[in-house]
Amino acid sequence: MGKTFAEKVLGKAAGMDVSAGQIVTVAPHFCMSHDNAAPIAKIFGEIGVKKVWDASRLVFILDHAIPAPTDKHAQNHKVIREFVEEQGISNFYDVTSEGGVCHQVMCEKGFALPGLVMVGSDSHTCTYGAFGAFSTGIGRTEMAATWATGQIWFKVPDSLKIVVKGEFRKGVSAKDLILKIMGDIKSDGADYMSVEFHGPAIENMSLASRMTLCNLGIEMGAKNAVCPPDEKVMQFISDKAKSSEWEAIWSDDDAYYEKVLEYDLSDIEPGVAKPHTVDNYATVAESKGIGIEQAFIGTCTNGRIEDLEEAASILKGKKVAVRTIVIPASWEVYREAMKKGIMDVLLDAGCVIGNPGCGPCMGNHEGILAPGETCISTANRNFKGRMGNKESFIYLASPATVAASALKGEISDPREVL
């Protein structure tokens, strides 16, 4: 019997042959934290260790509330900057024009690499699987202990194989696919599993689209989500890799899977996740006409250049009917969008452009909703209160669907305006 991706990567990191269900202890290649590095630093101090085990393996990226919207956030950032200086952490992305949303930065800057074991104190760390990494979110206490010891234990997860073939129809994208998958298997359908995306359609997808798929792995309960590290990955990391320890690893053809699912992209329609759960799936056709007060394009799920291009193609020469907030996932994306003229299109359409960061995704600032208001968003969560108010409503959708909805002031099918 062959090995799954998770069995291979965790076995290599543990230095032994392993199978699903075994407990292994490994040294992560990179540990990522964002604004929550401050409370983690406090826990680390309580452990009694003076220095982190390897400062070069820690990556701090401020993104959740930047620039600081309150004095509490400012104090939090101050604690992190002091810890960075004290520990000699060189991989620090402060509130400058070099950063952005942590998961986007980790991929752009070459930390996300094939075959690495990566942990982050954020649940959407699973995004890095788009580059063939075993990446997963962990808790604050776990992260503090990992900083101190350089080790963390995992149970080797069972694996779920998702085979994707066919081609998207016009107006349909990777976000629509993953919303459909989550609607089918529900938020616990892949609990503590390693989700592997296979098939010719995955090979044809851009790295940005693969990031969207892997980003939402956690929303169906997965421990990690991963795509094959193919030539597209190799080309991207060739001049960016922050480690020489990477290796292109993929599952064997005869590996055992707990479940195997198959999807044909030609069957996928524009979809939404209705309030207040990510697996509350409906097609856009079933949701058309629901009024909105705000549209939001951005986040670690859909704030990349192809997402902004998709929105701009719909909004060009038109005006939005509701307040529409666009936040590029990083300053690198922001600069590229300026060079391509995308920013002009969005501004001319009436959009408000925010600085790269998480913004309103978790309700910190830059677009908090009022009671009773409805937002259609490209983000990854629509829980009650997620965007700052428990009496508001959030629909999740693709950039195309969000842009089309912004034009009409109600949930709309992008195929009707493309």
Image (spheres, grey):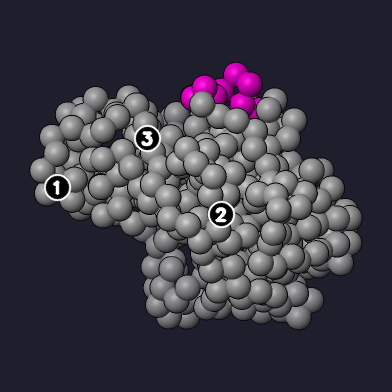
The answer to whether mark 3 and mark 1 are in CB contact below 8 A is no
* Apparent side of residue 261 relative to residue 223 in the rendered image (left or right): right
Reply above or below: 200 against 379.
Answer: above
Residue 239 in magenta stretch: yes
Residue 349 position in % (x across, y down):
67, 50
Judged from the image, the secondary structure of the residue bearing numbered disc 3 is strand
Which residue corresponds to mark 2?
Answer: 19
- Residue 59: numbered disc: 3
Judged from the image, the secondary structure of the residue bearing numbered disc 2 is loop
Q: Which residues are magenta?
A: 236-244
Reply above or below: 160 against 125.
Answer: below
Q: Amino acid at mark 2?
A: Ser
Q: Amino acid at mark 1?
A: Ile
Q: Please indicate, yes or no, whether residue 206 appears anywhere in the rendered image.
A: yes
Picture quadrant of residue 409: bottom right
Determine the CA span between mark 3 and mark 1. Answer: 20 Å
Reply above or below: 377 against 10.
Answer: below
Q: Amino acid at mark 3?
A: Val
* Apparent side of residue 372 relative to residue 343 in the rendered image (left or right): left
Residue 407 position in % (x across, y down):
70, 62
Which residue corresponds to mark 1?
Answer: 47
Residue 35 vs residue 367, the one in the foreground:
35
Numbered disc in front, either 3 or 1: 1
Density class for disc 1 (Cα within 10 Å; few <14, some 14-19, many ≥20) is few
Sequence order check, earlier mark of 3 and 1? 1
Residue situated furthest top in the rendering: 239
* Apparent side of residue 387 relative to residue 6 in the rendered image (left or right): left
Residue at the image point whose x is 79% and y is 76% from the top: 285
